[in-house]
Image (tube, grey):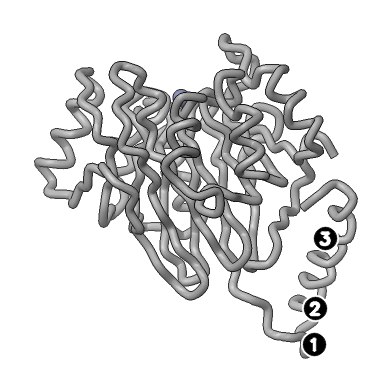
């Protein structure tokens, strides 16, 4: 979705809403995929609801955000999470996991293949094991869900990033019809390079990119943008955060490409929808 097409898309969306409200005989709309970037301040949490109502949660913010995410899910009538992807063991991604596991039925959890010693991570692993929650350590690229015209893959390059936990982030690609969505966790440039050498560009291409590492300048490189070619970039970061995320360099990179930017620090939670042929939102991007 490029800048000049947004007014047309918004008016089409509004028109569709009006048709649905008035109940007149409109063509059957395609089922919608919803992608939510939940506002968890300086952290990450994305919720994906597929057209067949499968629920995928990626990360759960820091330890102060568990209740907020739980309330968000409850507001959206969710009581079961089919796939819970924990990108990597940093506290701003797994701090709220305990709360989610306690309050929701979680069918399956995915973890990156990295060993990490911290009280928080060990507590998380203990909980998963004690409660016998099916857990997969993703070592290779894995398809975790297939529905009509939709597929969800966790991409793993298999590269050893040693102590650089951010780069171990599980990366999730959702394709629905002609539209792609790529969720990067905190992956930085080294991980982007590994992905580009391990996967064909068609497996990385996405209309919507959740930028790696909260919009830092060490992620979302020019070569990676050349491959992914996003129309929309989502940035999850806290208002006035001490890391100065997102970095002005990244914003400039995106502005130069006329990419729409959505930011939780300025806009709160963001919701996008797709019918498989386009992506739309009732919220305008920050750089409209
Ligand atoms: Zn992070």
Q: What element carries label 1?
A: loop
Residue 47: x and y, percent?
A: 49, 49
In the picture of the structure, the residue carrying the numbered disc 1 is 24
Q: In the image, is the residue at mark 1 within 8 Å of ligand 1 by its beta carbon? A: no
Q: Is mark 3 on a helix, strand or loop?
A: helix
Q: How far apart are marks 3 and 2 (CA)?
A: 15 Å
Residue that appears at 18% across and 34% down: 125
Q: Residue 133 carries which label?
A: none
Task: Give residue 24's quadrant in the image.
Answer: bottom right
Q: Can residue 223 be seen by looking at this rendering? A: yes
Q: Distance between the residues labelled 1 and 3?
A: 21 Å
In the image: residue 244, left or right of residue 190:
right
Q: Residues within 10 Å of mark 2 (few under 14, many from 20)?
A: some
In the picture of the structure, the residue carrying the numbered disc 3 is 9
Residue 153: x and y, percent?
A: 41, 54
Residue that appears at 24% across and 26% down: 121
88 vs 28, nearest the viewer: 88
Residue that appears at 22% across and 42% down: 137
The answer to whether 237 is drawn above or below residue 135 in the figure is above
31 vs 38, nearest the viewer: 31
Q: How far apart are marks 2 and 1 (CA)?
A: 6 Å
Residue that appears at 87% across and 63% down: 11
Q: Which image quarter is the C terminus in?
A: top right
Sequence-first tag of 2 and 1? 2
């Amino acid at each position: 979705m490029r800048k000049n097409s947004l007014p047309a898309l918004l008016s089409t969306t509004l028109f569709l809403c009006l048709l649905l409200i008035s109940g007149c005989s409109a063509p059957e709309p395609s089922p919608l995929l919803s992608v939510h970037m939940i506002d968890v301040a300086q952290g990450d949490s994305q919720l994906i609801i597929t057209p067949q109502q499968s629920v995928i949660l990626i990360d759960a913010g820091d330890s102060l955000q568990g209740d907020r995410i739980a309330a968000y899910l409850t507001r959206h009538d969710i009581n079961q999470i089919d796939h819970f992807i924990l990108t990597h063991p940093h506290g701003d991604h797994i701090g709220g996991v305990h709360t989610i596991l306690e309050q929701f039925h979680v069918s399956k959890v995915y973890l990156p293949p990295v060993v990490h010693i911290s009280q928080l991570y060990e507590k998380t692993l203990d909980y998963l094991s004690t409660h016998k929650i099916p857990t997969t350590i993703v070592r290779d690229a894995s398809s975790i869900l297939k529905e009509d015209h939709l597929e969800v893959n966790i991409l793993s390059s298999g590269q050893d990033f040693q102590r650089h936990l951010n780069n171990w982030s599980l990366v999730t690609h959702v394709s629905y019809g002609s539209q792609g969505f790529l969720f990067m966790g905190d992956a930085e440039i080294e991980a982007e390079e590994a992905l580009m050498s391990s996967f064909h560009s068609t497996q990385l291409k996405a209309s919507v990119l959740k930028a790696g590492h909260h919009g830092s300048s060490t992620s979302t490189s020019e070569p990676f943008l050349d491959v992914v070619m996003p129309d929309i970039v989502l940035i999850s970061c806290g208002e006035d955060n001490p890391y100065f995320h997102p970095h002005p360099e990244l914003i400039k990179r995106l502005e130069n490409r006329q990419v729409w930017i959505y930011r939780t620090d300025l806009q709160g939670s963001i919701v996008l929808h797709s019918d498989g042929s386009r992506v739309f939102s009732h919220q305008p991007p920050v750089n409209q």
